[in-house]
Each structure stands twice: as structure tokens, then as C-alpha cells.
Amino acid sequence: MTLPTQKLHKVLAQSGLGSRRDMEALIASGEVRVNGLVATIGTRISEEDVVTVGRRKVRLNFAEMAPRVLLYHKPEGEIVSRDDPEKRASVFDALPRVRGGKWVSVGRLDFNTSGLLIFTTSGELANRLTHPSFEMEREYSVRVVGELSEDQKRQACKELLLEDGPAHFEWIRDNGGEGTNHWYQVALKEGRNREVRRMFEALHLMVGRLIRVRFGIVQLPPRLKRGQFIEVPPAEVSKLLAWVGMEPMPTAQRSPQRRGGERQTRSSRRSTKT
């Protein structure tokens, strides 16, 4: 009997390696082999095939299950990368391991920015949440030295010229402050490098603290402390999938040990290893 097949790039995406578009690019690079032969875009595979990326054998997931989603409260002083020549602390150090896949970050936050980071096992979901065409609103709390004038607020919501092109806030809310420090709540629909900081610099104000509190419909949970993560319940994941136009999928069963580790601090994770 002939085994059913699926497209290689789809299975790789389901296995947590990235979005389908990313997997097509990976296949085109010649890094993917099926049974020892270099794969091409359009290659179909069955459960009997052996797939490698570089020298690493991939544990394939043929069942398209609902992705997992984590919310992480990133502290300042961590990078959003797995590889760093300077060996700085990474946000990925605090996350639980994923069997047969990996966590994909939904966007990034720079080294000195704290707040909400979303992680998912679905490259497709991450791509939809971050692609410019979806225009996901990001909301930040910003502390600056000084205060914006009404003219500056209007200009910031209209257009500011940065080195990499024009930018603007969707809205600005004044949250007050004490002394020389002032807090603002701002929102924008882009995720360019250091964009919020550079926008305030264009207004001649220096950012002292920057905290992301919302990404699209996802809020930073108020009780989630810095350095902690929490897994989003399946019902809420389904709402997120529907919001970005993805089909609902069956939910994978979790082991009790994994459920018990859904919310930990970095220090507690280290203590359980020793």
C-alpha cells in the first residue's frame, strides 16, 4: 500500500522549524535532504522518509496540531537570539524544551527593552503576527526625560523622518510623571529596530525605560513577573488563530510534567537542573 504524502515545506513548518515561506527558502538553499538526496521545492514525503537539515535529522510532525503559545515577560539585559558571540543571557534560556520542534519568537525586543514577548511552535503563526501586511498594533509604556509639547504629539502621530524612512505613532497617551521623568503610552503598527527609541530621539527626548505591554490582541498579564513565562490555554490559542485567519486545529495532549512547568522563573529552572 502506498503511504500518503505531504509537501516537504509544510511538514517542516508543522515540525516547528519556521513558516512555510521560510521552509521553501531553506529547501531552495540546498540545505535539506530527503533520504540523502538534495530536496527541491515541491518535494513530497511520507512518514518513512528521512529528512535532514545540514547534518541534523529532523523529527517530523505529519499531524497538523494546534500550536503552543507562551507569553514571556522579558527583563532588560536579555537578547532575543539563540546565538550571541558575547555569550549574553538569552530569552530562550528560560523557556521549556519542545519535543520535536522549537520556540519561534514573534518579533523581537532590544537588549534594554522589557515587556511582552510571544513565543510559538508555529512558524506560520509567527509570520502572520509579524508580517507588515497584517499591521499588528504594538503598545508600549515609555518613560522619558522631559515632556512632549502638544505640537510634538501631533507631529509624532503624523510623521517623523527616521534614517530608514518615515514613522508615526497610532496614538499617544500622557500618563504623567514626577520631576524630570514623564510616562507616555504609545502604539504603532511596525516593528523596526529600536523604532520607539529612535522616534523619541527625533523629538529630542531620551528614553529611560521602554516596556511592551501589548501585541495585537495579546496583553502582558499583570501578574506575570519579569523573567517568568506562562502558556496560553488552548481556547485562547484558538481565538488567536481565528484572529489571524488560520484554521482551528486539534490540540495535542500534554504530559502532566509539562503542564506543571508552564510558569517558572529562570532561577527555579536552574534549581531543578542541579
Image (cartoon, rainbow, N blue to C red):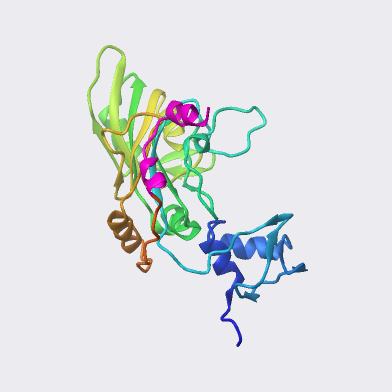
Q: Quadrant of residue 152?
A: top left
- State the extent of the magenta-drawn residues as a range: 256-274
User: x%, y% of residue 102?
Assistant: 53, 50
Residue extending farthest top = 179
Residue pictured at 29% horizontal, 54% vertical: 236
| Residue farthest bottom in this picture | 1
Identity of the residue drawn at 74% across and 54% down: 55
Residue 82, percent from left and from top = 59, 39
Image quarter where the N terminus lies is bottom right
Provide residue 267's location: percent of width, then percent of height: 45, 26
Residue closer to the observer: 240 or 166: 240
* Observer able to see residue 205: no
Magenta span has 116? no
Horizontally, is 213 left or right of 167 in the view? left
Name above or below for residue 52 compared with residue 72: below
Q: How many marks?
A: 0
Q: Is residue 132 left or right of residue 136?
A: right
Please determine whether, in this image, residue 13 is positioned above or below residue 213. Answer: below
Residue 176 is drawn in which quadrant? top left
Position in image of residue 156 (x %, y %):
35, 37
Please indicate whether residue 221 sits to the left or right of residue 273 in the image.
left
Q: Nearer the viewer, residue 239 or 156?
A: 239
Residue 141 in sight in this render: yes
Report the predominant secondary structure element of the magenta stretch.
Answer: helix
Asked whether 57 or 105 is in front, the reply is 57
